[in-house]
Structure formats: structure tokens, C-alpha cells
């Protein structure tokens, strides 16, 4: 574990995310002092502080501990049909709970805020729906998932999107 890389990663994220220094500073100070006290005995470290830091930084614990590197584990598989089912689940929320229900509105508003898009508009148009699918595929590939290349060729019709996805297959 490279503590300098971890520190630089935390510092980079705290600046780019414009995190409130007082709240963030307490968490980092506690984390560092805990690491110093415990040394290499990670089993006794209060690991919950890592979860708090990851939440504040909007990242994952493994990214913090690796100094921001994505640790690819090419062992998880996902089918594009499962990703598409996720998009269909949003429609199901609308049908089952109603368009104005807090469940549906909360899910939609959360996605819109996180992705800075209007997900309902994207899902109405076939091309933008395919763009969302390609983005989800890329996200999975970046996080170590395996997706069958033949399935990608079959499900993604636009050459531009296929080429974008290919960059992440290697």
C-alpha cells in the first residue's frame, strides 16, 4: 500500500469535488491517525472510516486504498440483456408505483442529478437509449466485467458507439 499515492488521491478528490474542508478534514485526520496507531494490523483498524471517506469522495474503498487505480478483476460476467432489464425496471417503477410516486420520482431525480441528464427523455428515443446502453457497457467494462463481444456487436447498431466500447475491451 502506497500511502503517498493514497494521500495524493484523497487530496485530488477533495479539490475536484469541492468538499467542505472542515467535515472532510476530520475524517482524513482520523483515518491517518488510526493508520499510524495501528500500523500494519489492519484487522483492528476502524474500517468504517474508509466507508465514510469513500462516501464523501463519491468513490470506492478499493480506489482509495489503491491510490485511485482501478483494480480490474476480469472474472465477473454481465449480459447486455441484464443491463437492458435495468432500464426496463425504471419503466416498471413508473407502471407499478405511478409517475408521481416518490419511489419513481426519487429514482428518476437521483439518476438525473447523478448523470446530469433527463433519463426519461433519453429512454424515449432509440438512439439516446442506445447511447445509455453503450455508456452502461463501458462502465461495466471499466469495473472489470466481461461482456461477450458478439453480444455487443448484436446489440449496438451504431459504429461510433461500437468503436467507443472497443477501446475498453482491451
Image: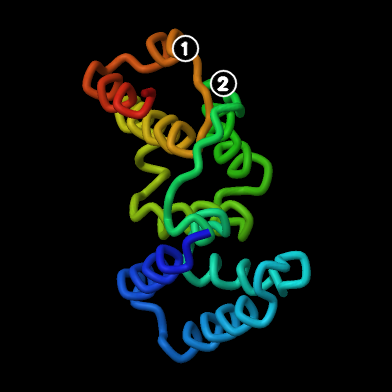
Callout 1 touching callout 2 (CB < 8 Å): yes
Query: In the image, is 121 to the left or to the right of 38?
Result: left
- Choose top left, top right, bottom left or bottom right for residue 27: bottom right
- The mark that comes first in sequence, 1 or 2, is 2
Image quarter hosting the C terminus: top left
Element marked by disc 1: helix
Task: Residue at the far front: name it.
Answer: 40
Q: What's the coloring here?
A: rainbow
The residue that disc 1 covers is: 151
Q: CA distance from mark 1 to mark 2?
A: 8 Å
Query: Residue 99's spot in the image, x, y percent?
Result: 55, 49
Disc 2 residue crowd, few under 14, some 14–19, many 20+, Cα 10 Å: some
Q: Residue at x 41, y 87 (%)?
A: 21
**Mark 2 = which residue?**
79
Q: Quadrant of residue 124?
A: top left
8 above or below 91?
Answer: below
- At mark 2, the secondary structure is loop
The residue sitting at 41% across, 60% down in the picture is: 113
Q: Position of residue 132 (x, y in %)?
A: 38, 35
Q: Nearer the viewer, residue 15 or 156?
A: 15
Using residue 88 as the reference point, say whether residue 21 is left or right of it: left
CA neighbours of label 1 inside 10 A, class few (<14), some (14 to 19), many (20+):
few
Amino acid at each position: 500500500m502506497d500511502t503517498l499515492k493514497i494521500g495524493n488521491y484523497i487530496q485530488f478528490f477533495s479539490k475536484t469535488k469541492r468538499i467542505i474542508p472542515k467535515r472532510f478534514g476530520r475524517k482524513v485526520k482520523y483515518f491517518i491517525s488510526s493508520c499510524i496507531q495501528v500500523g500494519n494490523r489492519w484487522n483492528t483498524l476502524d474500517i468504517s472510516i474508509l466507508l465514510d471517506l469513500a462516501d464523501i469522495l463519491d468513490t470506492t474503498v478499493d480506489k482509495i486504498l489503491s491510490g485511485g487505480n482501478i483494480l480490474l478483476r476480469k472474472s465477473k460476467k454481465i449480459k447486455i440483456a441484464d443491463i437492458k432489464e435495468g432500464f426496463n425496471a425504471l419503466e416498471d417503477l413508473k407502471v407499478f408505483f405511478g409517475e408521481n410516486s416518490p419511489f419513481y420520482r426519487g429514482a428518476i431525480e437521483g439518476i438525473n442529478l447523478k448523470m446530469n441528464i433527463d433519463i426519461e427523455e433519453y429512454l424515449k428515443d432509440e438512439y439516446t437509449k442506445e447511447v445509455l446502453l453503450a455508456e452502461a457497457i463501458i462502465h461495466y467494462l471499466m469495473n472489470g466485467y466481461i461482456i461477450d463481444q458478439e453480444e455487443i456487436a448484436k446489440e449496438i447498431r451504431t459504429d461510433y458507439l461500437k468503436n467507443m466500447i472497443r477501446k475498453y475491451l482491451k
